[in-house]
């Protein structure tokens, strides 16, 4: 079902409702940063633009390094390359629209554009979580079952795992988008967010099934994300147990160092998500909620390439070597 057919379905639902003083919504207004003082918007724009560009360039640098260095053609770096792609696509789906709205007076977004943004942001967001889970499994096999690593993580199996991650993210994105845009939106069309955020949209829907749909969407999303987090946690329980059995301190440190960058990204990814979605109900201003939301949509993707570049010694050395080979051929 396309976004236009979802719009038609939503209008048909509105027509079937009992006659009330409702006006069917045909477009939404993204409030976002429009409530901020005008003199601060250029500062936020410049800051988030720099972070956006750095996110793109950092992930492209990681992908180019992995592609050019044959010794990095291993499962761990294949998954990292797929993670960088999902991160780039997620930021492209969310950040450019936010940047344009900061300096624009026209904040409306059509049904089709809103549905498309929700689909792509959910698809790439869930793909990111699934890939982090697979990277945890990769570290578990490498440390706990090193003799079986080449069998369990063959090139064909790695491609299959990455494909399943993208397929799973696409299914989650399509399912949530179809559920939400099957509802009828009437009355207010003000989305108190800088993107088509699912919970903000559900607050604008009307009809008897709204509460059950809201609960269903929350359960689906939380189950998928918590399932990924639980499997990552379980992998590291076995990893830590295996590391503690290593007799030498140097061996334990060397083994654990292969997990540090992945574990740090997992903590940052789920930590910022928890701050946003699990914060206690209280008198939070709309401006503070907007800034908190950017920690997950802008700041987390910005940190990810930095963490992998600095905490992964092998990747860091490969980036240095590629840089020297490119710009200082005599020194290299």
Image (spheres, helix red, strand yellow):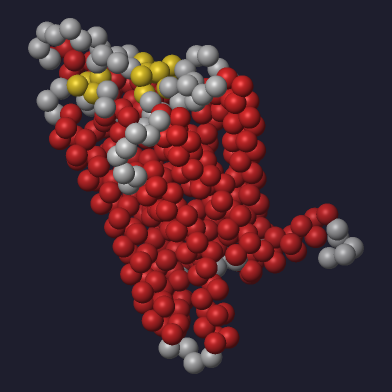
Q: Is residue 178 left or right of residue 332?
A: left
Asked whether 147 or 114 is in front, the reply is 114
Res. 8 image quadrant: top left
- The answer to whether residue 167 shows anywhere in this view is no
Q: Position of residue 224 (x, y in %)?
A: 29, 51
Residue drawn where x is 41% and y is 29% of the image: 286
Residue drawn where x is 51% and y is 76% of the image: 256
- Numbered-mark total: 0
Q: Position of residue 45 (x, y in %)?
A: 60, 29
Q: Position of residue 44 (x, y in %)?
A: 59, 31
Res. 293 image quadrant: top left
Asked whether 13 or 251 is in front, the reply is 251
Residue drawn where x is 42% and y is 22% of the image: 30
Q: Position of residue 204 (x, y in %)?
A: 27, 23
Q: Quadrant of the N terminus?
A: top left
Q: Quadrant of the C terminus?
A: bottom right
**Up-down relation of residue 117 to residue 184 (above or below):** below
- The answer to whether residue 265 shows anywhere in this view is yes
């Amino acid at each position: 079902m396309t976004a236009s057919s979802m719009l038609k379905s939503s209008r048909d639902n509105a027509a079937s409702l009992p006659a009330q003083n409702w006006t069917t919504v045909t477009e939404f207004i993204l409030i976002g940063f429009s409530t901020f003082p005008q003199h601060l918007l250029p500062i936020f724009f410049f800051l988030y633009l720099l972070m956006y560009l750095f996110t793109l360039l950092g992930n492209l640098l990681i992908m180019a390094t992995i592609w050019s260095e044959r010794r990095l053609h291993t499962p761990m770096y294949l998954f990292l390359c797929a993670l960088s792609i999902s991160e780039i696509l997620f930021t492209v789906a969310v950040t450019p629209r936010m940047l344009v709205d900061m300096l624009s007076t026209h904040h409306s977004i059509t049904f089709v554009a809103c549905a498309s943004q929700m689909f792509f942001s959910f698809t790439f967001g869930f793909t990111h979580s699934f890939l982090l889970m697979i990277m945890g499994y990769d570290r578990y096999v490498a440390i706990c079952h090193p003799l079986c690593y080449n069998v369990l993580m063959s090139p064909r199996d790695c491609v299959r795992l990455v494909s399943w991650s993208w397929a799973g993210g696409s299914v989650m994105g399509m399912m949530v988008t179809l559920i939400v845009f099957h509802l009828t939106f009437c009355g207010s069309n003000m989305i108190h967010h800088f993107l088509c955020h699912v919970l903000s949209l559900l607050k604008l829907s009307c009809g008897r099934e709204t509460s059950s749909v809201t609960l269903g969407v929350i359960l689906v999303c939380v189950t998928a994300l918590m399932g990924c987090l639980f499997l990552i946690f379980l992998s590291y329980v076995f990893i830590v147990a295996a590391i503690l059995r290593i007799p030498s301190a140097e061996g334990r440190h060397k083994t654990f160092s292969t997990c540090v960058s992945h574990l740090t990204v997992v903590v940052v990814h789920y930590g910022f998500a928890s701050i946003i979605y699990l914060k206690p109900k209280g008198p939070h201003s709309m401006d503070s909620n907007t800034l908190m939301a950017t920690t997950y949509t802008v700041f987390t993707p910005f940190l990810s390439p930095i963490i992998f570049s600095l905490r992964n010694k092998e990747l860091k050395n490969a980036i240095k070597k590629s840089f020297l080979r490119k710009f200082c051929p005599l020194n290299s």
